[in-house]
Image (spheres, rainbow, N blue to C red):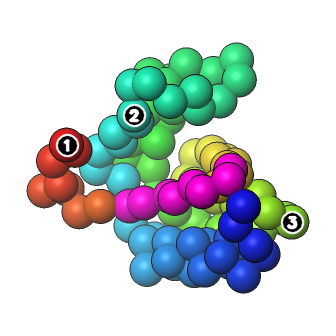
Amino acid sequence: MPELAEVEYYRKEWNPGIGHRIERVHLHPRSRLFRETSPSLIQRRLKGASLIESFTHGKNLLFHFSGDGWLGGHLGMTGELRAETPEFQPG
């Protein structure tokens, strides 16, 4: 399970995106992402939004987006959270 230092590392990895607009959102089709929230809703809410700031709370990652959008996540046992360039093609 990721320790607090790894959670903070992933949070800081997103800092270069602060102020930038999200052009595309890809979610793994077999992942259970968020209880009671559809992947398509997450994609619609995030696309076009800009990252304002990020936080950690314990081992949770919290991201604040324009339009008063929030996204929270936990890396799980061996998790990873990535941001890619618009040219990225998921495999």
- Residue denoted by label 2: 28
> Helix, strand or loop at disc 1?
loop
Residue at 72% across, 61% down: 1
**Which span of residues is magenta-colored?**
76-83
Q: Residue furthest right?
A: 58
Badge 2: residue crowd in 10 Å (few <14, some 14–19, many ≥20): few
Residue 83 sits in quarter:
bottom left
Q: Position of residue 91 (x, y in %)?
A: 19, 43
- Quick one: label 2 or label 1, which is nearer the N terminus? 2
Amino acid, disc 3: Gly
Amino acid, disc 2: His
Q: Position of residue 71 (x, y in %)?
A: 64, 47
* 15 displayed left or right of 37: left
Q: Is residue 13 visible?
A: yes
Residue 88 position (above or below residue 38): below
- Residue denoted by label 3: 58
Q: Position of residue 35 (x, y in %)?
A: 71, 23
Mark 3 or 1: the one toward you? 1
